[in-house]
Image (cartoon, grey):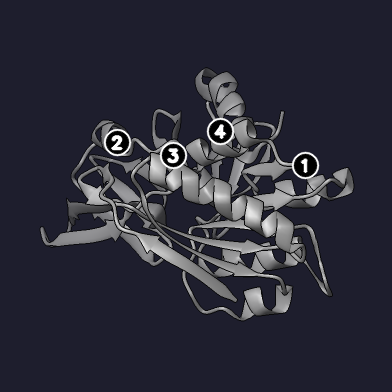
Amino acid sequence: MEIIRKFYFNMISKGNNMVLNALICDDNQRDIDIIQRYFSQYCEEHIIEFECDTFTSGKEAIASDKFYNIAFLDVEIDSVTGIEIAKKLKKKNRSIVIFIITSYKKYMDAALDLYALRFLEKPFSHERFYGGLDRALELIDEEEIEFYLKESGARKRVMARDIVCIETDNHKTKITTVNGEYYSPRTIEAWDKQLTNVCFQRVHKSYIVNMTFIQKYERGLLMLLGNNFVGVSSRHQKNFRKVFHSFTGRE
């Protein structure tokens, strides 16, 4: 494993500094060098602090215990495929942005099932690489949300990325997260204004969902993490279908 040096710059993102922790895994060192160079140049040009680990072995990449929020994975690496590595990384961080590097179309469906953001086809396109990173930054949300709990009036802090969905419940809202459920007196309209990351979408007058946690989308019905089902209203279906397909990289 090679770790390239950090560049310490400040990027203002909702009042916080953003650090991109990236993983590159490819059994071709030349391709690693190209991705590493493009990634480094992008971060320098956009004044982003970053760290980047590179691997030529899929097994070594899986064994890493570091937290990554972006990964560039060759689809065919020794005995472990990029798809398998992506699944492992998703277990550590459900919100990780995955780029699949391949010239083989046969892996497209499997990658899209993991909500891979982009396919990077060899030879690499500088423009497509930069465009993919632009979208990746839209999806990486490190914002901490603070709100009052309805029952006790106490304060609660959660990471925006951990919110699965928000729904109206009488005169309050229920916030379902990966760690539990909470009730707040804040209206769903107030939540809609605060959750500006593209992964949060209003799909119904009573629901906001985090697309990162969509397990299945079929006929206007969403299955979210934990087998929670949410319907997409007829008013929102056209726009949501367009945003969802863009989010998952589908045409």
Specify which label sits upstream in the sequence, 1 or 2. Answer: 1
Residue that mark 2 sits on: 188
Specify which label sits upstream in the sequence, 3 or 1. Answer: 1
Q: Is mark 3 on a helix, strand or loop?
A: helix
**Residue type pointed to by label 2:** Ile
Density class for disc 1 (Cα within 10 Å; few <14, some 14-19, many ≥20) is few
Specify which label sits upstream in the sequence, 2 or 3. Answer: 3
Which sits in the foreground, 93 or 124? 124
The tag on residue 123 is 1
Residue that mark 4 sits on: 131
Specify which label sits upstream in the sequence, 1 or 4. Answer: 1
Discs 2/3, front: 3
Q: Does residue 43 appear to the left or right of 72 in the view shown? A: left
Discs 4/2, front: 4
Instruction: Place residue 231 in its image quadrant.
Output: top right
Q: In which quarter of the image is the C terminus?
A: top right
Question: How many angstroms separate mark 1 from mark 2 (CA)?
Answer: 46 Å
**Residue type pointed to by label 4:** Gly
Density class for disc 4 (Cα within 10 Å; few <14, some 14-19, many ≥20) is few
Residue that mark 3 sits on: 138
List x then y, in percent, for residue 125: 68, 36
Question: How many angstroms separate mark 2 from mark 3 (CA)?
Answer: 22 Å
Question: How many angstroms separate mark 1 from mark 4 (CA)?
Answer: 16 Å
Residue 109 appears in view: yes
Specify which label sits upstream in the sequence, 3 or 4. Answer: 4
